[in-house]
Amino acid sequence: MMRIALLGFGSVGRGIARAILAKGLNITVTGLADSRSGIIDAGGIDLAAALARKEQGGPCGNQSISPMDVVEKAEYDILVEVTPTDVETAEPALGHIRGALRRGKHVVTSNKGPIALAYPELRALAEANGVLLKYEATVCGAIPLIHAMQEGIAGNTITRICGVFNGTCNYILTRMAAEGLTYEQALAEARDLGYAEADPTYDVEGIDAGIKLVILANTILHMETTLDDVERTGINLLSPEALQLAEDQDCTIRLIGEIIPEAGVLRVSPRIVPKVHPLVVEGTLNAVTVEADLAGDLTFVGKGAGSTETASAVIGDLLYIQSRHVQGS
């Protein structure tokens, strides 16, 4: 039996809990926390009851128990850190992950902040304590992109990574091209459907895509980069006329993130792309092409966000660790 502590019980955390219940996985949750409360129970937490409390607007547990209490006091094999991302400080997730690694616990996270800002430190801490740090869910949701590059094409030299890394922008651009909507109209529609936040800056100015490039550059390509190294142009200034010009050439516009490691290039910008290009996907889909010397071009397409899709990546990481490291499983 694998024991996990789950920090974060918003959309992603609840998606993980539902997947654990639905799939009958051999996983016991012994620690659970949201921003307001926590539960520690070595015998196993009743996830269905915690979900019910949360969905009725209450806290998931006892308001005297903090997330850090769960990190430091619960008995678990793997910490699952899925609290909201802070791309400037990476906190509080960074502190949670450090605490678990120092206790000799494996960590699985969907939180981009710690991986983008402190990966070398966290990797060294994991190695020093003989545990694993897994982060598939930080880039492109359900697409097993990181695993494919680390495991599937190990031994290849990756010469370029490019793709559509942000589903919100892709939805907006798809709607502008299909219906002739203005940027403002398409953004309002994306908000109504829950694809865009009230403040869409993080998505539409290319920050989210840029952070994903930093994660891939630092963890897969062994570059030492920060968000400041990414050349960024967002989609917020695009006009319907620009999309029509692309249409006249049988092309469209997509927000493309690109890494060329040999040249030290990381950039995010709207690009004119032929409609038949494999990166031209519709709606909120993500698509990424990896160019490698032995494998050639590999293109991955799938859902880049959503509670169930992110849960898929987290559970994949959990089962990877379970199959290799967790005793008694």
Image: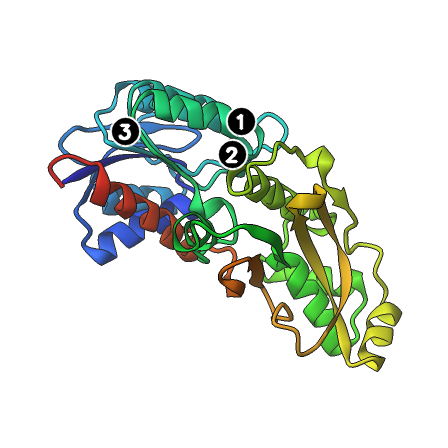
Which of label 3 and label 1 is nearer to you?
A: 1
User: Is 178 drawn above or below residue 172 in the view shown?
Assistant: below
Query: What separation in Å lies between label 3 and label 2 (alpha carbons)?
Result: 26 Å
Disc 3 residue crowd, few under 14, some 14–19, many 20+, Cα 10 Å: many
Query: What separation in Å lies between label 2 and label 1 (alpha carbons)?
Result: 6 Å
| Residue 119, percent from left and from top | 51, 30
At label 2, the amino acid type is Ile
- The quadrant in which the N terminus is found is top left
At label 3, the amino acid type is Ile
Q: Residue at x 82, y 74 (%)?
A: 246
User: Is 300 drawn above or below residue 66 in the view shown?
Assistant: below
Q: Residue at x 28, y 33 (%)?
A: 78
| Residue 156, percent from left and from top | 49, 52
In the depicted view, which residue is nearer to us: 167 or 139? 139
The disc at residue 118 is 1
Query: Where is mark 2, residue-wise?
Result: 115
First in sequence, mark 3 or 2: give its number.
Answer: 3
In the depicted view, which residue is nearer to us: 200 or 51? 200
Q: Name the image quarter holding residue 122.
A: top left
Disc 2 residue crowd, few under 14, some 14–19, many 20+, Cα 10 Å: many
Please, what secondary structure does the residue beneath circle 3 have?
Answer: strand
Please, what secondary structure does the residue beneath circle 1 have?
Answer: helix
Q: For residue 64, say whether it is visible.
A: no
Query: Where is mark 3, residue-wise?
Result: 39
Q: Residue at x 47, y 54 (%)?
A: 145
User: Looking at the image, do the residues carrying marks 3 and 1 touch, with CB atoms under 8 Å apart?
Assistant: no
